[in-house]
């Protein structure tokens, strides 16, 4: 089956940043109904990838590569408002409070999207509005309220309702729960999960929060300084990360990774785009590096079982074998 | 409603301040009317009597209180140069000025807003840069120069000679067009360039907001983004600017236009009053302008909560 | 499907950012030339009416046979003098009141200053100038006085807002915590940070003063003992209809050069000091 989204060899760099790229040679397929998690520390290029998919990179960015959605190649600088394959995508954002227009009632904001979508449904707009609101478990009366009258969790539900109103097949969620408190976070994730299954949505979930990723995503991508360093099904990556960086990330959350953080894997220094070497970008911070790592770039290899890919010359051994 | 009372008190204190200053400048230190009233060669006793009548000998506070009392009871007096009641003079001339100024003012602002939208949409690329450069050029050309160039070009035999160069005999749309086109064009020119950069800055600020990113992500086009998303969020600063420049336009802006084109509006009246030292008229106009500012402030408090649901009636910030 | 990887720097919004300085120096050079050129006195009336450009009258003469170049030079100095006086007085007055008002935000000095600002803004400017000119008719600088008394308000509002904004910053809180006096905190910590706003507002006042002076003297409310661009333009309204443009052009071009160059310089000052404008 053809993938819904296919990203080939995508590189992006922002203006005024020299030759340092925010994304480097990214390859990614997302199939119908697939859930992909994107993890990495701040500044590694997660949002950039999402924006590239949405055609919303700021003007002046330099890019290379190809993106196609539903078999259709898309422009990087698509004119806003023009119908395109990108209509398949919807995006929800980290800060729901500021992501909604403050002076317009949320019902109208959703209706605008329904109207723009037009054609496909014969359903009257009001009915459709009620439907998407009920899908995200908001009472219908909410449509008369303004964003500031809603709680953070409700605002994020409104954004989800907007995504449904758009009838998108792909939902990109850029840190959707970061601004929410713990219990609301769980509710939103559960809702996201349920909607994903009900509507058979493909989801690209970007998060610092590995537990969120673990709840929602089947595939996980670990990004480091604009490169994919490890890509594997969720169970595999949580059980036996092969890349030292992935292991370090996982070590930071004691709940999933019960072992105490490996001293060698704690992450000293910080990731900055300036520290570009000809070798592995992680090498300066890596405890497993050797001379080779600093000179040559490790390719994204497959492990023997073909499910787990990692870009490392000295991957962590599989611990304790497969139980 | 303590907020309401607070605001009313503040407005009253503004009015008191303005009237006090105008009293001091125009009455207390203003022209001594006793000579004019007494006629030629008055003797000292006559003068003294007139001064007594005018209240010149009373202490400052009681004179000021009398002045306020007259204003508050709309007892504006008679114009000294024409003898007409000042209230009637204002009532006759204000509509003329509004007819002359409002269309140009509104068209100019609308045009500025449209151009600002174009500039904000094409931020930092050539349409924006062109408009920015043009507006810098435009604001640097004095109002006077625009008026003179336009009227020489459009109203004299040297130029196209399409319009009369002076006067105001308006009784319908076509006569309005005859007499108001050239002044309006000048006003539009100034208004556009005076406001373009302000509106652009407002819209640029809005364009950086997250909700614009959301709108773009959900397929909104340039028009939807500008008119349905950004504009509703900039209405308050835009309206503030419009409302608060209205009194200034009406009183000060009309001065140049009406005296140049010989149009009998409030500007011409104040121009004549200035040169004839026509105290009652000047007093009335200054007070009128202050009252307008107060009214506009109240109006703003009333309208803002309707434009932005986050502002409740009680929490208006100025 | 690929674009060049070369990086584009965000363009300066102004086509020729140096133009402002260039025009300004052009104006100064013109003024210097006019100062050293042997021109007749600007007041002298001669029978040589509406003379064209000649060695004796480089810009011709007006309806009274007065030398336009001499008048233009005199008018320029007059404008510049008024511009600088008003800018410095109104600017510092506004700054001082803004600092006090911002520092005591919410307390009575602030309330008083805000009230005063509101009052001054509610008075129509031209009528105020006329009234001041009358009330202080024995002074030759009543117009300057009236402008100073009205032009400080925007500066006060801006500086007040800036002080309130900066007061919340950590370094100011720290300075206050270690017991630095208000005056010292204001002058050595807040003022330098508010400087961009203040500088821009200074040149705004300058422009406003020049423009106001021209309009006032055009209307006949200016200082009648000297010549000014506004008076020249006012004279020229009749001459232009008769086809004599020299008076009009000399005054309006000089006026335009001054305002345009100062606007351009202000604008690049603003662009350069506003961090948000620098990044695309
Ligand atoms: N508009 C921009 N102009 C210049 N550089 C940018 C811009 N946006 C992002 N960058 C740079 O590109 C890199 C990747 O940024 P991106 O926002 O994609 O990171 P991220 O992974 O989403 O980080 P975070 O977790 O903090 O959201 C960062 O180094 C950032 O500094
Ligand atoms: Mg991000």
Image: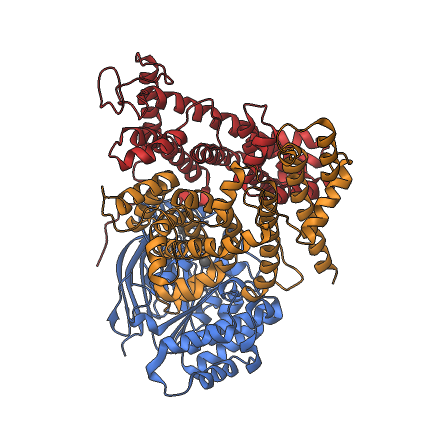
Chain colours: A blue, B orange, C red
Q: Residue B72's x, y, as percent? A: 69, 52
In the image, B103 versus A24, the foreground residue is B103
In the image, A271 versus B263, the foreground residue is B263
In the rendered view, would you say C63 is above or below C266? above
Q: Residue A195's x, y, as percent? A: 47, 80
Q: Dividing the image into four equal quarters, which quarter contains ligand 2? A: bottom left
In the image, A82 versus A9, the foreground residue is A82
Residue A23 appears in view = no
Q: How many labels does the image show?
A: 0
Which residue occupies 33% across, 14% down? C40
Which residue occupies 60% across, 63% down? B302
Q: Is residue B97 left or right of residue A300?
A: right
Q: Residue C77's x, y, as percent? A: 42, 22
Task: Locate the N terminus of chain C and report the quarter of the image it occupies.
Answer: bottom left
In the rendered view, would you say C138 is above or below B89? above
Q: Which of the 4 image quadrants contains residue C268?
A: top left
Q: Residue A300's x, y, as percent? A: 32, 60
Residue C127 appears in view = yes
């Amino acid at each position: 089956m053809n993938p819904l989204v296919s990203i080939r060899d995508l590189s992006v760099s922002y203006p005024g940043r020299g030759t340092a790229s925010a994304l480097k040679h990214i390859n990614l397929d997302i199939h119908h109904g697939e859930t992909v998690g994107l993890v990495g520390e701040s500044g590694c290029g997660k949002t950039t990838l999402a924006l590239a998919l949405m055609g919303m990179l700021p003007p002046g960015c330099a890019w290379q590569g190809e993106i196609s959605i539903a078999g259709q190649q898309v422009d990087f600088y698509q004119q806003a408002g023009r119908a395109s394959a990108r209509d398949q995508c919807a995006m929800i954002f980290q800060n729901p409070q500021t992501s909604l227009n403050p002076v317009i009632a949320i019902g109208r904001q959703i209706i605008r999207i329904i109207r723009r979508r037009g054609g496909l449904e014969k359903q009257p707009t009001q009915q459709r509005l009620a439907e998407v609101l009920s899908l995200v478990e908001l009472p219908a009366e909410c449509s008369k309220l303004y964003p500031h009258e809603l709680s953070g969790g409700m605002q994020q539900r409104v954004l989800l309702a907007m995504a449904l109103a758009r009838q998108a097949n792909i939902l990109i969620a850029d840190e959707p729960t970061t601004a929410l408190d713990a219990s609301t976070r769980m509710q939103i994730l559960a809702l996201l999960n349920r909607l994903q299954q009900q509507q058979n949505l493909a989801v690209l979930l970007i998060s610092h929060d590995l537990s969120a990723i673990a709840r929602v995503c089947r595939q996980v991508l670990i990004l480091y300084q604009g490169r994919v360093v490890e890509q594997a099904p969720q169970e595999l990556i949580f059980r036996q990360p092969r890349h030292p960086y992935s292991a370090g990330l996982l070590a930071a959350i004691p709940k999933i990774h019960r072992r105490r953080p490996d001293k060698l894997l704690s992450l000293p220094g910080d990731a900055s785009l300036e520290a570009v070497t000809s070798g592995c970008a992680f090498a300066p911070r890596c405890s497993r590096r050797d001379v080779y790592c600093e000179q040559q770039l490790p390719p994204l290899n497959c492990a023997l079982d073909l499910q787990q890919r990692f870009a490392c010359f000295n991957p962590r051994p599989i611990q304790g074998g497969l139980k | 409603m303590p907020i309401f009372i607070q605001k009313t008190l503040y407005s009253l204190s503004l009015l008191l301040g303005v009237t006090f200053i105008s009293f001091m400048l125009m009455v207390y230190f203003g022209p001594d009317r006793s000579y004019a009233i007494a006629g030629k060669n008055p003797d000292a006793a006559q003068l003294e009597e007139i001064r007594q009548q005018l209240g010149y000998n009373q202490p400052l506070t009681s004179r000021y209180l009398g002045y306020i009392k007259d204003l508050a009871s709309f007892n504006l007096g008679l114009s000294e140069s024409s003898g007409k009641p000042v209230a009637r003079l204002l009532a006759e001339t204000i509509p003329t000025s509004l007819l002359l100024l409002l269309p140009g003012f509104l068209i100019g602002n609308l045009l500025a807003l449209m151009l600002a939208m174009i500039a904000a949409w094409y931020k930092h690329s050539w349409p924006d840069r062109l408009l920015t450069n043009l507006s810098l050029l435009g604001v640097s050309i004095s109002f006077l120069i625009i008026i003179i160039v336009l009227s020489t070009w459009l109203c004299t035999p040297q130029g196209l000679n399409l319009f009369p160069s002076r006067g105001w005999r308006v009784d319908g749309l076509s006569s309005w067009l005859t007499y108001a086109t050239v002044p309006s064009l000048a006003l539009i020119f100034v208004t556009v360039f005076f406001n373009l950069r302000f509106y652009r800055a407002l819209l640029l600020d809005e364009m950086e907001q997250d909700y614009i990113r959301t709108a773009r992500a959900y397929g909104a086009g340039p028009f939807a983004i500008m008119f349905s998303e950004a504009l509703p969020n900039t209405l308050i600063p835009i309206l503030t600017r419009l409302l608060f420049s209205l009194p200034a336009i009406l009183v000060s802006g009309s001065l140049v236009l009406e005296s140049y084109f010989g149009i009998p509006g409030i500007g011409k009246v104040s121009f004549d009053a200035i040169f004839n030292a026509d105290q009652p008229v000047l007093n009335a106009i200054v007070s009128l302008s202050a009252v307008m500012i107060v009214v506009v402030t109240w109006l703003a408090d009333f309208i803002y909560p309707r434009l932005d649901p986050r502002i409740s009636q009680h929490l208006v910030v100025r | 499907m690929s674009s060049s990887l070369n990086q584009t720097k965000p363009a300066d919004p102004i086509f020729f950012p140096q133009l402002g300085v260039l025009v300004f120096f052009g104006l100064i050079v013109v003024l210097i030339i006019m100062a050293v050129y042997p021109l007749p006195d600007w007041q002298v009336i001669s029978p040589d009416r509406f003379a064209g450009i000649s060695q004796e009258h480089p810009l011709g003469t007006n309806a009274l046979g007065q030398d336009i170049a001499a008048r233009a030079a005199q008018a320029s100095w007059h404008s510049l003098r008024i511009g600088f006086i008003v800018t410095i007085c109104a600017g510092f007055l506004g700054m001082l009141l803004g600092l006090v008002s911002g520092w005591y935000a919410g307390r009575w000095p602030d309330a008083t200053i805000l009230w005063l600002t509101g009052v001054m803004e509610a008075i129509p400017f031209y009528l105020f100038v006329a009234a001041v000119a009358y009330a202080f008719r024995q002074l030759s600088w009543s117009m300057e006085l009236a402008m100073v008394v009205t032009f400080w308000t925007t500066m006060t509002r801006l500086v007040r807002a800036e002080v309130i904004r900066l007061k919340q910053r950590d370094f100011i809180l720290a300075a206050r915590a270690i017991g630095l006096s208000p005056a010292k905190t204001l002058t050595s910590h807040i003022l330098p940070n508010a400087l961009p706003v203040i500088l821009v507002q200074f040149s705004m006042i300058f422009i406003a003063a020049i423009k106001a002076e021209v309009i006032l003297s055009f209307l006949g409310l200016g200082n009648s003992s000297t010549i000014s661009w506004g008076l020249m333009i006012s004279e020229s309204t009749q001459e232009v209809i008769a086809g004599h443009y020299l008076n009009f052009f000399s005054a309006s071009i000089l006026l335009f050069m001054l305002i345009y160059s100062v606007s351009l310089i202000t604008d690049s000052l603003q662009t350069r000091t506003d961090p948000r404008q620098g990044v695309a």
